Image (tube, grey):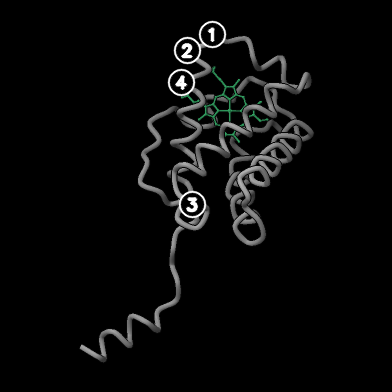
Amino acid sequence: MLVISMALAAQPKTASLYERVGRYDTIALIADEYLKGLRADPKFARFAGRGADSLKRGRQLLKDQLCAMAGGPCTYVGRDMKSVHGGLGINAQEWQANLDYMAAALDKAGIKGAEKAEFLKMVDTLKPEIAEK
Ligand code: HEM
């Protein structure tokens, strides 16, 4: 028994990014703050012409997706990123501005240091699927 508990204690911490940022409530806050930033920016106005219910649905799917990507217990049931964003003409500058809004949302949620960097890196893995070359 002692040997087992010593072995467990020696294991490195493997908490998911989801756990380390503060679970679902923090993910939801990050998504809400991120969308607040994007939607207030006139540069992104051309992406906004959808009804209230579609916007709500998109917001929930974003939360589910970020939660699942960070290793949380959520399942993303939306469409794949390439199909959803294909044809929207999202360029490299818009992609960078989107990352800046994500960084500001992480700041608002109090996520700093390694977790902030890891979260941004995680979002940036989607660039080839969302932004056009
Ligand atoms: C420049 C950045 C982005 C812009 C302008 C943008 C724009 C959009 C637009 C206009 C839609 C609605 C498409 C439609 O229903 O026809 C959408 C849907 C969606 N986006 Fe983005 N997006 C961006 C980045 C991201 C990122 C970084 C993520 C994930 C972390 C994301 C996740 C989603 C999800 C989950 C949906 C809904 C999927 C579905 O309806 O099945 N988007 N986005």
How far is disc 1 from disc 2 in space, using C-alphas? 6 Å
Of the image marks 1 and 4, the number of the one nearer the N terminus: 1
* Residue 57 badge: 4
Mark 3 lies on a secondary structure that is loop
Query: Pointer 1 and pointer 4: residues touching (CB < 8 Å)?
Result: no
Which residue is at a point 45% across and 76% down the rendered structure image?
12
**Residue designated by label 3:** 22
Query: Pointer 1 and pointer 2: residues touching (CB < 8 Å)?
Result: yes
Crowding at dot 4, Cα within 10 Å, few <14 / some 14-19 / many 20+, comes out as: few
Crowding at dot 3, Cα within 10 Å, few <14 / some 14-19 / many 20+, comes out as: few
> Nearer the observer, disc 3 or disc 4?
3
**Residue designated by label 2:** 53
Q: Position of residue 126 (x, y in %)?
A: 59, 41
How far is disc 1 from disc 3 in space, using C-alphas? 31 Å
Q: Position of residue 97 (x, y in %)?
A: 75, 35
Q: Position of residue 51 (x, y in %)?
A: 54, 8
Mark 2 lies on a secondary structure that is helix
Question: What kind of residue is marked 3?
Answer: Gly
**Residue designated by label 1:** 51
In this view, 84 is above or below 48? below
